[in-house]
Each structure stands twice: as structure tokens, then as C-alpha cells.
Amino acid sequence: MTAAGSAHRPGPAGASRYPPIADHGLIGDLRSVALVDTGGTIGWYCCPRFDAPSVFASILDADRGGSFELAADLPARTKQFYFPDTNVLITRFFAADGVGEIQDFMPVVVAGSAEDGRHRLIRRVMCVRGSLPFRARVAPRFDYGRQSHDLSMRGGRAVFESPSLSLSLSASAPMETDGPDVWSEFKLTEGECAVFALDKLGDGVEPRSCPIAEAEEEFAATVAYWRRWLSTSRYRGRWREMVHRSALTLKLLTYAPTGGIVAAATTSLPEQPGGERNWDYRYVWIRDSAFCVYALLRLGFSEEAAAFMNFLSEHVSRDCGSPSGPLQIMYGIDGRTELPEVELSHFEGYQGSAPVRTGNGAVHQLQLDIYGALIDSVYLYDKMCQPISSDHWEEIHTLVDWVCDNWDQPDEGVWETRGGRKDFVYSRLMCWVAIERAMRMAGHRGLPADTPRWQRARDAIYRQIMRRGWSPRLRAFVQHFDDDVLDASILMMPLAKFVSPTDPKWLSTLDALGRTLVSDSLVYRYDPLASPDGLRGQDGTFSICSFWYVEALTRAGRLDEARLAFEKMLTYANHLGLYAEEIGQTGEQLGNFPQAFTHLALISAAFNLDRALG
């Protein structure tokens, strides 16, 4: 293959201009992230926050998105890996004349330190054998390519200034300007190194260079940070490498200043190439974050759980008079409630998948399941970390009272369908979880609670699910009441301890799901032809559901099937152990990348399967 960067040059529209979604690694500093493809090009970077407008977005528009290309300037094959136990990404180039590598990382700044507010992306280029020529092209396109910028050279640095953001690029290699862009060509021999550092300017931060020695110190400090964090993991099971990569990925998706955890690092990577199922996931979903807390607690990471509890207390208001309930389904990483959905019509989208969207119109949907996910995570935090405060309990009490009054109404459901509200079984299930977990906390701690009322509501939900959520024809629990449509979210029933994993009704449901929605260990959410969701086109198998299936098999005692399904799922990870949201027909990764939902489900499935295997 040729050196990376060629895929992003102007050319005919089509897939060849866009590297596969899976051909990317992720780096970040707990405030923002960047995607680096296997050829060394950064095709996605938002500065200074996850949800800020993009600086590089060639993954969404090869011509107008902007990119940071850095590669060997001759034909070379490439390989990518993470520096062990870190989020430092290494891209290696193997050519006839030698071997080189790029070390990509973003130094992690401790909140409240003297460096707080600084954002730096470092690309350290090394020749490890022989000699190699390299080339770089830095082409920022600010505000999703909507803002032009001025470029000036100051003291050997390139300064890009737009109305909304200014960046400084320093390099130990010579740089030349080309209109709004900067390029560089240089040659390294064995043992030599070059450094490119991109810094955010403003807020009292002056431009500065990054000498080679300083880059080496930053590299060592970044490696030490990630290894120190990962060393607190308690997981010692069979799939340690994959579990720890998932944990490192979840940590990268955490916004340190508030403790919010974003659902994914990107926007508008398609669930179906060329289709319209393209959404912005750079926000804090209550459900996704709560599940992340569960997964991280399983591994022994309690600080992240505490930070998310603080996010809820400080940034999430609870207006019980709101038509969508006291909780929104998602918030901005700073706790903001308005996330208007906007289409970027000037972007062609990944492989022509339009529209490209920012914001998310589902923000004010009614999704009753979020109360169960949230209160379950609080229950686990109270049980596994430290008892929640009296203020937290009052907040939980308010939420449970609201659930008792409102559980028996249709909603949009866990999959955020746009086909109208229905009586989704999963939503009822998680309302049951919300009340049941709160009752456990109250009983264990002797906390004040309206126990008789809560118990009546809990038992009413149970009976309603058993009566109206069961299909005698399918002999299975179904997607919504009084119908015969299957849905993979029902896999949560035994995981949430609503039903015994060996209950005959559940085993019959598990078999029905296996016949209908499972394809070689991969699980579809539902059949949109049987249950229209208000959108055109199909989507792939949903990877969180595939890991739920593994866990359901595990709990049912079908360990051989569970282990085989799990091992198969691991083969669908990319070369770095990362997953997008979905898997397509030929095994390609689809949707936003990497996806927190998938990685947290991997952790849970691995933990429980490993324990069951002994």
C-alpha cells in the first residue's frame, strides 16, 4: 500500500477517498480526542472539547474537512499499535530503505494545575532503521470547514487564526506555507527524530515551541499517566488485554472538568453507508454514562463513578414538571440542556452519507429506561464504593416518586426511534429496576422511603410485563406490548435480575432471539420492517446487543455457546481492539467510533463469562 494521505486528496466521490472507519486509532487528553488512520493522517479533531467544532474532519468530507497528514514519502506498508497499557498511538512505516514510526499523543493536564487550559497534540516522528523521507501537510478547516483563517509564521512557528479559534504549530523540521496550509518535507536517518506540536492559543496561553527534548519528556509523562491509571484495575481474567483496552477507551471518552462521559468520539459516521442514519454522539447520555459507571466499577475504577455522580449533582437539574420528565436523556459535556440538531449541508459525509449533523434532536425525547440505568449505577456506587450522601438520596427519592407516577405511559424507547411512542417492554423493565434498586438502598441503609407506594408500583410493572409483554405465539418477551415483534433490548431482563436466567419463559425467549435476530454471534436490535422506526434504510448488527447476548448465554449456563460467541465478537474488533457502534454485512465497522456502549458491554460480558468459567 502507499503511504497514508493519498486517500484524502481531492478525487472522485467514493469509498476510496475515505479510509474504513475501523482503520483508525484514538488519542486524547480527557477533554478532546483525535482519530489517526493507519496511514498517519489525523482526519478528526475537535479543539478544545469533544463537542467543539472540528479543526480536522476529512473523515466527513475529504475536500472541505481538513486534515493533518504525516507519513513516509515513499511506498510503504503500515502497522499501528498502542504503546503497551497506554493511549499513546504508534504508526509504523515499513519501506525498502528503512523503518519509521509516528508516536501520536496528547499530554494529559491535571485540572487546577498551572498547565490547566493548555491543549497540545504532539506527533513525534522517528527513523528506527535505515533512512526514510517524510512529508507533512497541516490543513486545518475551522468550524466544520465554515470559517476561513489567516496563516502567519512567527519565530519559526506557524499560527493559524480563525474568528473562533487560534492554533500554533511548531516543528523541528523546516516548514513552508501553501495558501492556508503548511507543508514540510524532511529526511531522517536511523536514530533521528522530528517533532510536530499543535497548541491551542488564547486564555493567556502564549505560543511556544516543543523542542525534541521536551517532546520526549511529554511522551514519558503521558505514558506514565496512563500506566498509573490502568494499574488500579482489579481485572486479572482471561481477556485482560481486550478488557483493559476497553477501559482505556472509556477513560478517553471522559470529560475531566465535569466527569461527563460522551457516548462516542465522533458525529455522523453512518450506520448505513450512503444512508441518513447519521447522528452526533459527542454528548453525555444518562443511560450510556450510567452503564459506563457499572463497567468501570467492576474493574475497580471508583474515581470515574464519583466524578459522574458529581456531574449529576452539579449539572443536571430535575424539573419534575417537564413533559419529558425530571431527567433529559442526554446533556452537553458541561451540563447544558439545549443541543439543537443542525445539518452541515456543505459536507458530503463519510462515503457520501448525508446529512452530516451536529447536535441531537432526540434530546427532549421521553425515554423512561434512563431512570433504571441511572439508579442502578447509584445503587452499585453506594454498594461498591461509598454510601451516597443524604442530598443524593433526596434526589433519588424524587426521581423514584416521579417514576411511580409516570411509568405507565408510552415513550420513544432505548433506541431513540422516530416512529412515534409505544409501550416498550424495555422501558417498563428499567422503570422496575429504578424502583427495585432504590428499595434495596433504602432497606440496606435504613433510608427514608415511601416503601408501600414504591412496592405497589414495582409489582404492578412486573405483572404488566408478564401479562402484556409476553407473546404466546412467539413464546417470547417482545419489543412492545400486545405485539409479536422481537427486540434485543429484552436481553437485559436476566442481566437486570428481573427474571431468572433459567426461567422457562426466559430460555424460550433466548431461543427465539437466537433464531430471529442473531447472525453468527452478531445481534440485530430489531427488524425495522416488522417494527418501523421512522427512518429509511437498514442498520447493521448492534455490538452492545451482541455482548448482552454473550452475557445472557453465560447466565443461562450455556458457557460453551457464550465463550464461542464472545471469541467471535473479538474478531470483529479493529487492529487496536476498538469498536464502532455496529457491524455491517461483511464485518465492517459502522457508526460512530469508538462507541462507549460497545466497550462497556465487552467489559461486563468478559467479567461475567470469566467468573462463570472459573
Image: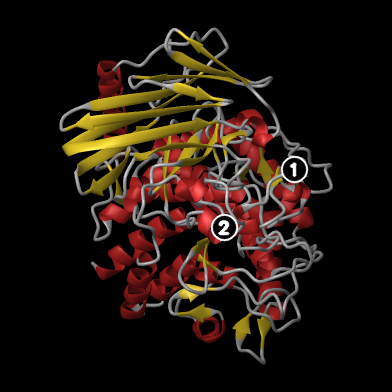
First in sequence: mark 2 or mark 1? 1
Quick one: quadrant of the C terminus?
bottom left
| Residue 176 appears anywhere in the view | yes
Q: Position of residue 247 (x, y in %)?
A: 38, 46
Q: Position of residue 586 (x, y in %)?
A: 47, 73
Q: Which residue is found at the position 60% from the left and 56% from the top?
A: 12
Q: Left or right: 549 with respect to 301?
A: right
> Crowding near pointer 1: few (<14 within 10 Å), some, many (20+)?
some
- Which of discs 2 and 1 lies nearer the camera? The answer is 2
Judging depth in this view, the residue of 42 and 491 nearest the camera is 42
Q: Position of residue 395 (x, y in %)?
A: 66, 37
Residue 326 - label: 1
> Crowding near pointer 2: few (<14 within 10 Å), some, many (20+)?
many
| Residue 441 appears anywhere in the view | no
Q: Left or right: 532 with respect to 576?
A: right
Spot the residue most to the bottom: 473
Q: What is the count of numbered marks?
A: 2
Is residue 148 positioned above or below 265 on the image? above
Name the kind of residue labelled 1 in the image.
Pro
Q: Which residue is found at the position 24% from the left and 61% from the top?
A: 238
Residue 218 - label: none
Q: Position of residue 607 (x, y in %)?
A: 34, 59
Judging depth in this view, the residue of 469 and 28 nearest the camera is 28
**Residue, disc 2:** 591
Mark 2–mark 1 contact, CB under 8 Å? no
Is residue 155 positioned above or below 474 on the image? above
